[in-house]
Amino acid sequence: MKRLITIASVAVLAVSALVLMQCDELLGGRPLNVTIVADTDSTVKITWGAPTEGTPDKYIVLFMETGTSGYTELGDATATEYAHDPEGKTGKYKVTAKFGSDEYDGAATPSTTPIANTGTTVGELNSADLAGYGWNRSTGDASTYTMEDAGSAANVDFYITDWAIGYTGPDYSIASPDYAPTDPGNVTPAGSWRVNAFSNLLTSEHDPLPKYVETINYFGFTDLTTDPALVACYTKADGYYALVKLSGYNTINGTVQAQSWFQLVKGLRLIQH
């Protein structure tokens, strides 16, 4: 009888240990749906969902600055959000759920690093090259478009013009698409062209872009008086910021080389890249 009791006790202990091991495995889980939005035009709010397995002791929020290779701990949180002032820097964010000595990283590492678009030839309005330039709001990728078709209106964020028939300049400007139907170049039909705004020429391509203030520091067009020229663009209809770098003005062919960096976080004017 004693032997039977001993065997039964061992079996109970084994089952209990197995249950405890299974429970331990379910005690922790990763934060869900880590996302970022603009808290202000220069600060970031990180939000996430609680793990489906257990309640963490705390969350740890980390940041990896653009151009570096390691995360820095920003601080702890018990709620599922955290506000961060990156002091003009951009980069990736990570959230970790801590259960005792165990840590679980969120799967997503959202970023404020702007989407870079390499050099593209953009034509002056009357040249043979496409004069319209615009960004995809989902990917940040840039493309060029004809300004001679009102069907382009939903895609164009700026065009290049010398405010005259022809393309010999001598000076070019970056201009809001809604100017194009009345541009002296006389090739753009009426349509629902976007109304965007541009800063005066900038001196740094990594500092935060100027805060949008209509008619005070952003305008319907900006003259390109330096080569290269750095100009901030603010998309007035939906509130995105981008940096445009224009260079290599060619008044013989009527072309300009355009690079850009588009900030996918709506309303955020950080552009370090």
Image: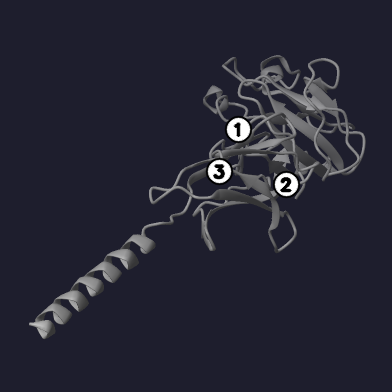
At label 2, the amino acid type is: Thr
According to the picture, the residue beneath numbered tag 1 turns out to be 146
Up/down of 219 relative to 113, above or below: above
Q: How far apart are the two marked residues, 2 and 1, measured between alpha carbons?
A: 33 Å
Q: Which mark is residue 137?
A: none
Kindly identify the amino acid type of the residue bearing the numbered disc 1: Thr
What residue is shown with label 2? 90
Label 2 CA crowd tier, 10 Å (few <14, some 14–19, many 20+): many
Q: Nearer the viewer, mark 2 or mark 3?
A: 2
Q: Residues within 10 Å of mark 3 (few under 14, many from 20)?
A: few
Q: In the picture provided, is 80 more to the left or to the right than 220?
A: left
Q: Which residue is mark 3?
A: 139
Percent position (x, y) of residue 207? 84, 41
Which corner quadrant of the image does residue 26 belong to?
bottom left
Left or right of residue 117, residue 247 in this image = right
The residue mark sitting in front, 1 or 3, is 3
**Observer able to see residue 125:** no
- Residue 232 lies, in percent from the top left, at 78, 33
Which residue sits at x=57%, y=49%? 59
